[in-house]
Image (cartoon, rainbow, N blue to C red):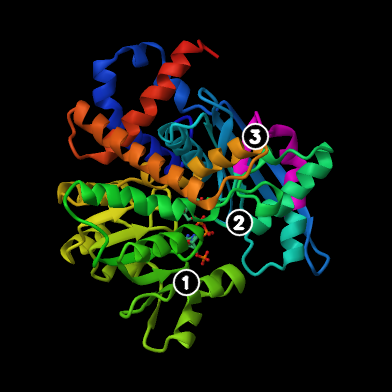
Amino acid sequence: KRRNPFEYEFHQAVEEIFNSLVPVLEKHPKYIEQGILERIVEPERAITFRVPWVDDSGKIQVNRGFRIQFNSAIGPYKGGLRFHPSVNASIIKFLGFEQILKNSLTGQPIGGAKGGSDFDPKGKSDAEVMRFCQSFMQELYRHIGPDTDVPAGDIGVGGREIGYLFGMYKKLRGNFEPGVLTGKGLNYGGSLARTEATGYGTVYFVEEMLKDKGMSFEGSTVVVSGSGNVAIYAIEKAQQLGAKVVACSDSNGYIYDEDGIKLETVKKLKEVERKRIYEYVDYHPRAQYFEGCSAIWSIPCDIALPCATQNEIDEAAAKLLVANGVKAVGEGANMPSTLEAVDVFLNNEILFAPGKAANAGGVAVSALEMAQNSARLAWSFEKVDRKLHEIMVNIYRNSINAAEEYGFPGNLVVGANIAGFVKVADVMIAQGLI
Ligand code: NDP
């Protein structure tokens, strides 16, 4: 904390991970002796840069760009770019740090990174977003490459932004290198099922966790926060598995539809028209809109899938969910539950799927996109989806087995952290002090 003052989210992520590593450190003192903990919390490289651009009124705007290349032990740096006004060094560092273990869990050869900017794409014209992305890439391009560092999307960065970023990268390099970014459009090297991957993967993971206890999505009531990329496809897969999803949200408020959310309307509003979620009630008058997004957790449900942002479930919200009979919580977002909220879930024996494991499907399919780009091939949707499903089942199995092995049966927080950590730590030792 002394070396990284005011980086609260980063401290939170490190605390959560280090606490759960205690059993592995006791069993294998080599990780302490080799200085793995000190090394792993220090990014290999952190880049901060100016992003100047001109808005539609001709005024010069300046944002700050970040890329944290955290750990390349097991493969090239890999992790998303987030464009949101709340972005700062702490948020990018917490995301990059978590990404190391998440990427390790996928079983794919990818290191950990994260980046982004405090630019807010909301309310900006396409031309403004394009100028911003071009300026951002004019600096970033010198630090990335298909075998070096491969960024992707995250909050505020979807297909449109990846397209503009890729266009500028191609121009600056003078090479068509599809493997430099993932989440690309299907006509220039993108993978089928990448758009769906994080949401579908989260539901596949939760399905596996439920199955172990003789439960399923069939007939359950589900609340999903957010209405972005992860939320939309978590809703879609949960509905396909027979669940009734009754609520979703954006940063202004949430909608409750007791008949079940009509996903086509949410997709039209959010993916096509870039509108606010309150407009849903214009199409479905029986649904209700409530201002303020955090009260979504007061809705009784069997399964809660937080898919919006970090720290959206605090201790009080967790207690409310438990009091209302929640049976399982699956994190589609990164660190959506505070440390106190996680304790509430674990102490009440709620099935809890931590984001690091549950939302790893997005980056896993990004790695499959890189593989397709290297081979100059495009796989079918069914093939990618089948591989995604296998990967999520494996992550669940590896995490639950690690939890059992180290004396915390059923605790997926401990299991995922240990399973992800051991592989990276062993490789760091094998590669020497670098
Ligand atoms: P999107 O930008 O597509 O959607 C984000 C959603 O969350 C929007 O509905 C947004 O509302 C809401 N939201 C964002 N910030 C806040 C906030 N501060 N308070 C309340 N609501 C907020 O992002 P994604 O769906 O891609 O990402 C969601 C989460 O999933 C993030 O934690 C991300 O890191 C994580 N994730 C994403 C992956 C991916 O493949 N996309 C992979 C793994 C994890 P509004 O429109 O009002 O801003």
Residue 83 in the image: state x and y as whole percent: 60, 54
What is the magenta range?
Answer: 133-151
Q: Distance between the residues labelled 1 and 2?
A: 20 Å
Residue at mark 2: C-beta within 8 A of ligand 1: yes
User: From the viewer's perspective, is 84 left or right of 243?
Assistant: right
In front: label 3 or label 2: 3
Helix, strand or loop for disc 1: loop
The residue tagged 1 is: 252
Q: Of label 3 and label 2, which has the lower sequence position?
A: 2
Which residue is label 3 attached to? 375
How far apart marks 3 and 2 lie (CA) works out to 24 Å
Mark 3 and ligand 1: say if the CB distance to the nearest ligand atom is below 8 Å. no
Callouts 3 and 1 close, C-beta under 8 Å: no
Magenta stretch holds residue 141 = yes
For badge 2, the amino acid type reads Gly
Q: Is residue 146 magenta?
A: yes
What is the secondary structure assignment of the residue under circle 3?
helix
Residue 113's spot in the image, x, y percent?
55, 36
Sequence order check: which comes first, mark 3 or mark 1? 1
Residue receiving disc 2 = 158
Q: Which amino acid does label 1 sit on?
A: Asn
Q: Are marks 1 and 2 in contact (CB under 8 Å)?
A: no
Q: Could you tell me which residue is drawn at 65 percent across and 34 percent down?
A: 374
